[in-house]
Amino acid sequence: MKKKLKLKPFVLPMIYLVLIAVASTLVLMNATLKGKVTDEDLTYVSSIILGNEIPVVSTDVKMIYPYTNENVKIGKYYYDYKADSDKQEQSIVHYENTYMQNSGMDFILDDVFDVVSVLDGTVIDVKEDELLGKIVEIQHDNDLISIYQSLSEVTVQKDDVVKQGQIIGKTGENKLDSEMKNHLHFELYNKGQVVNPEDYFEKTVGE
């Protein structure tokens, strides 16, 4: 007596998926050969397929400024030794008779404003410093770390996963830059080295 062949439950769905993929590929190839498909007609997939954690197509996102209020202005620039003397003068921090080169950028506004994450990332530290105020550090892709200082309020915790543009706190004052009153001090690190944030704003992570 012959035994009946039993298929495991997952076999048939897999066969259907393979057949659909083959059929879709043949249709696309046929249309492409006829010149009917352009790049604009294609919809790129970024979701996960069959549990594989590699996106089919990845997209780069531009880094945004760490605020959304259009009235915010630059109070101090990052100290760049290549910059002209006028800009370098606007990049010096003065504290207790000591002059220091600014390691980030300071954004000012009379009123308290929301501080947002410049990219998707994971909060790696939340702390408070006597001179710098409340601080949030976020790890991003491509070895980028963004640091937000002089916060009066923090709305995230360590290990939180945040999205680009998500509010992480509000501005405040600190003792190191007391002359600027309400402001945000923002620093950016690439592979452990502090960099000029102006070189990264409105550019993709890949750039």
Image (spheres, helix red, strand yellow):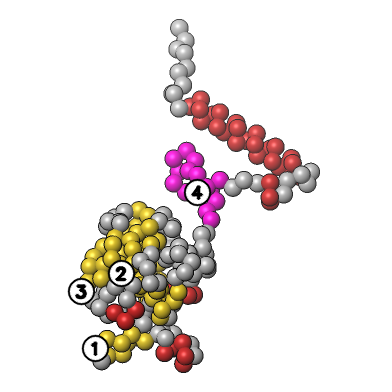
Residue type highlighted by circle 4: Pro
Q: Eyeballing the image, is 86 above or below 193?
A: below
Please report the residue visible at 27 percent of the width from the left and 90 percent of the height from the top.
98
**Above or below — where is 80 with respect to 21?**
below
SS for callout 2: loop
The quarter of the image holding the N terminus is: top left
Q: Which mark is residue 96?
A: 1
Per the image, the residue denoted by label 4 is: 55
Residue type, mark 1 in image: Glu
Mark closer to the chain start, 1 or 2: 1
Nearer mark to the viewer, of 1 and 2: 2
Which label sits on residue 61?
A: none
Neighbour tally class for label 3: few under 14, some 14-19, many 20 plus, Cα within 10 Å: few
Q: Which span of residues is magenta-colored? A: 45-59
**Towards the viewer: 37 or 99:** 99
Q: Residue 186 placed where, x, y %?
A: 37, 72
Mark sitting earlier along the chain (4/2) = 4
Horizontal and vertical percent position of residue 92: 36, 87
Report helix, strand or loop for mark 4: loop
Dot 3 or dot 2, earlier in sequence: 3
Q: Earlier in the sequence, mark 1 or mark 3?
A: 1
Does dot 3 land on a helix, a strand or a loop? Answer: loop
